[in-house]
Amino acid sequence: MTQTFPIEALKKKATPYYYYNIELLRQTLDAVKAEVSKHDNYFVHYAIKANANPVVLKPIMKAGLGIDCVSGGEITASLKAGFPADKIVFAGVGKADWEIEMGIDNNIFCFNVESIPELEVINEIAQRKGKVVNICLRINPNVGAHTHANITTGLSENKFGIDMAHMFDVIKMANEMSNVSFQGLHFHIGSQILEMDDFIALCHRVNELQDKLDAQGIKVKIINVGGGLGVDYDDPIGNPLPPLKEYFDVYNTHLKLRAGQELHFELGRAIVAQCGSLITKVLYMKDNTNKKFAIVDAGFTELIRPALYGAHHKIMNLTSNGPQDTYDVVGPICESSDTFDTDIKLNEVRRGDLIAMLSAGAYGEAMASCYNCRKLPKGYSSEDIMAE
Ligand SMILES: *Cc1c(COP(=O)(O)O)cnc(C)c1O
């Protein structure tokens, strides 16, 4: 499968917008299912914060994945997309009371609890409603990840999870509470991780913690290792699928599950990144003494990853076969950080050309904003685009 663009159909839509290659999304989901189906105790929850557009949620729901939410709004979007409540897990360091109530009222599968005060509030609200709710404790494993500093989450200096040193106390507290049911441990070390050694380090940490729990006779039903698997942003055409086999093999080889335990995963980026492209039009060409700027009609309001994380997306000129030249591709927003990339080679760029920014399916449309009073971008499925 290579990424191809239906250029004539794309030209008919008002730019900027997101284009989702649903065929590629399905192939990615098939590859996930092929790995997961080798084990009867592996479960994958799609991390909806990566992309909540209904056109991507539908194939993910149909593939039978569960869903990982970090807000009440995401729970609503998941239910609306047809995900069953008993496949919803809910994480986040700052769950508001109304969000907890919403999770309880909808009988979601599990809360991934990130602090003692949160545990107390969940127990209190559940008590008021006369329910017992499943909880996993998110433990901060103090495992680093070789990725951008803004997207590591598993170090003790990060705000996420419960300190390992407090694990026993918190399990004890949970077990003494009347309206929560302790199910297991949750971890998530970061995002865009391609070094399998980072996941191996997490496996070793979980093994250590499990040995300690065994020694105390504490039973754990669920181990949830979060997400974080990365994709190839440099060569999305050559590598449209993430290294799923390597990823699941790491856990199968290095994580020592106890009898009857379930292993849960929460993949976001790896599932949706490559199927999405931001399509934008060239508004103006500006030649300075030593720079050629291609000014496009998308900005960091549509795709903030380059400005926020210094990320690079592969950029293609879809409508030119002209000789290659070197360009800076920039947006219209009144901030210098509104630059998609600098000194990149593109086929000769002219006003009106259609530009694609690849691998934009994760944390693209989902992070769009209205800064400068701009409109939020639309996102179209390849199937809708072709049908018109
Ligand atoms: C963001 C997030 C994920 C998904 O991360 P990806 O890098 O997109 O796979 C999974 N679990 C939790 C708790 C998260 O916050």
Image: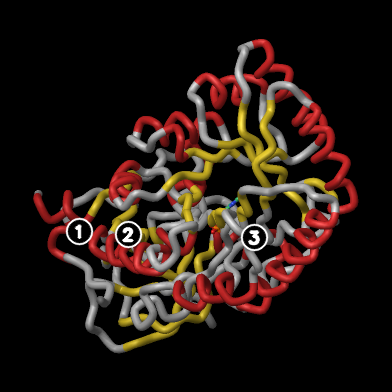
Label 1's element? Answer: helix
Mark closer to the chain start, 1 or 2: 1
Q: Quadrant of residue 258?
A: bottom right
Give the x, y percent position of residue 318: 26, 72
Label 2's element? Answer: strand
- 20 vs 97, left or right, is left
Q: Amino acid at mark 3?
A: Arg
- 388 vs 93, left or right, is left
Residue drawn at x 34%, y 74% as measured from the top left: 316
For disc 2, the marked residue is 279
Mark closer to the chain start, 1 or 3: 1
For disc 1, the marked residue is 10
Mark 1–mark 2 CB contact (< 8 Å): yes
Q: Amino acid at mark 1?
A: Leu
Q: Is residue 283 in sight in this rendering?
A: no
364 or 46: nearer the eye? 46
* Label drawn at residue 258: 3
Label 3's element? Answer: loop
